[in-house]
Image: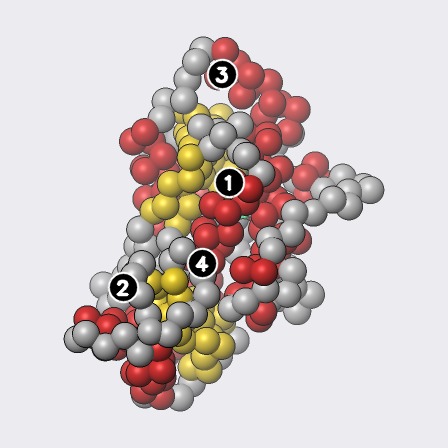
Amino acid sequence: MKTIIHPDELRSAVREIRSQKKIIGFVPTMGALHEGHLSLVRNARRETDIVIVSIFVNPTQFGPHEDYRIYPRTLEEDTVLLNREFTDLAFVPRVEDIYPQGYTTTVQPGPAGDTFEGKIRPGHFAGVLSVVVKLFNLVQPDLAVFGQKDAQQLFLIRRMTEDLDFPIRIVESETVREDDGLALSSRNRYLKVEERKKAVVLYRALCAGKRVIESGHRSLSDTQNAMLEAIAKVPEFSPDYATAVSDDTFTEEDPIAPPARLIIAGRLGSVRLIDNMKV
Ligand code: PAF
């Protein structure tokens, strides 16, 4: 695997790949890679000739009191894992190359970026979309793979790709879970042993909501209540939201109508966790 740091070098590598008419698959990440990321890489590999993975802890998507400074940076381990997956190229830019002095332009997500994660983390999605646009322009992929775990991010990236006419197919990749149901996340490594055991509450709440819907009920409040009841069993978890949204609009609908998704997020101690489940 080749590692490229400078955007100019990436541009010439991409030019070379494109001249050979090869199909490029792209997996943007912030590193601290786990099995969930590797499944994205495998999905990209399945449909393309060349797989490019970016590793960039993007400062603009973190709020002032969030974990940007301490976010795990594990480049050596990440490189080993990516090599094992036969990744062709890792793009690992420096902050000053992505955001040179004088940088001011951003991509705004529109109203669906102000709800749920966007409400709790103001400016988060503008940061995500702005960096994804830059990465799309640099990598020029044919397809890009994103995890379902960040469902609102995926929704907004699809919207943006369509709205801004990027000729890129967005592929979604299923959430990878631990045996007890906890969704894999780079932030799980912040959990203390006791918190890790309790973190299964998110998955349990999603399953409780799903059971309500599968039993034929479509009421939004019944579904939310079932999720809250499951959450109440772990008082250490303070939810930011636990509800159902339409997969088409990422807004709540009552009664719940397919295609829909249960979404949940909150804090366990100092660790913020999110998850979702299609219903
Ligand atoms: O999902 C992530 O890891 C990040 O939000 C992304 C898409 C790489 C943008 O920084």
Horizontally, residue 136 falls left or right of residue 234, namely right
Residue at 38 percent across and 58 percent down: it is 247
Disc 3 target residue: 18
**Which x, y percent locates residue 40?**
36, 42
Label 1 vs 4, first from the N-terminus: 1
Mark 3 in CB contact with mark 1 (< 8 angstroms) = no
Disc 1 target residue: 162
**Which x, y percent locates residue 38?**
35, 43
Indicate yes or no: mark 4 CB to ligand 1 under 8 Å.
Answer: no
**Hey, which quadrant is residue 100 in on the image?**
top right
Label 3 vs 1, first from the N-terminus: 3
Indicate yes or no: mark 1 CB to ligand 1 under 8 Å.
Answer: no
Label 4 vs 2, first from the N-terminus: 4
Mark 2 in CB contact with mark 3 (< 8 angstroms) = no
User: Callout 4, which amino acid?
Assistant: Thr
Disc 4 target residue: 249
In the structure shown, which secondary structural element does the residue marked by tag 2 occupy? loop
Q: CA distance from mark 1 to mark 4?
A: 14 Å
Q: Nearer the viewer, mark 3 or mark 1?
A: 1
